[in-house]
Image (tube, rainbow, N blue to C red):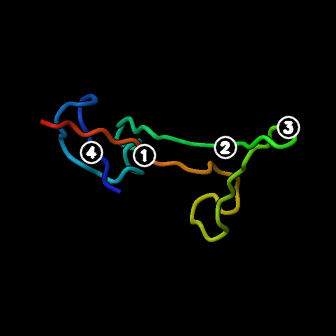
Amino acid sequence: MLYPVSASYGLPVFFSLERAAAPYFGIKAYGVHMNGYIEKDEKKYLWIGKRSESKPTYPGMLDHLVAGGLVIISEG
C-alpha cells in the first residue's frame, strides 16, 4: 500500500511510498489497531488474533484482530 507523505496532517502530499518503508526514511507512520472482548456469564473474555502460519512476518504469533495504516489526505 502506498503511503502519502506530508509535513503534517492535512497538508499537501509531497510523495507516496510503501508504508512498510516509511520508518527507514525517518517518516512517521500511524496505525490503527483493534482488539475485542465479549461478556459471558458476567465475565469478560478477550478475543485474541493469531497470524497465519503462511505469513512472511511473525507467522503463527499473536496479533491484533484488525490493524492498518492511518492515512489522512487533505481536500485541497
Query: Mark 1 near mark 3, Cβ–Cβ under 8 Å?
Result: no
Which label's residue is closer to the chain start, 1 or 2? 2
Q: Which amino acid does label 4 sit on?
A: Pro
Q: Distance between the residues labelled 3 and 4?
A: 43 Å
Which residue sits furthest front?
41
Foreground disc of the pair 1, 2:
2
Which residue sits furthest top?
8
Residue that appears at 58% across and 43% down: 34
Query: Mark 2 near mark 4, Cβ–Cβ under 8 Å?
Result: no
Task: In the rendered structure, find residue 43 and report the number of the disc placed on it.
Answer: 3
Q: Distance between the residues labelled 4 and 1?
A: 11 Å
Residue that appears at 27% across and 28% down: 8
Horizontal placement of 68 versus 27: left or right? Answer: right
Q: Which amino acid does label 1 sit on?
A: Gly
Total numbered labels placed on residues in the image = 4
Which label's residue is closer to the chain start, 2 or 4? 4
Task: In the rendered structure, find residue 4 and report the number of the disc placed on it.
Answer: 4
Residue 32 percent location from the top left of the image: 49, 40
Task: In the rendered structure, find residue 36 and report the number of the disc placed on it.
Answer: 2
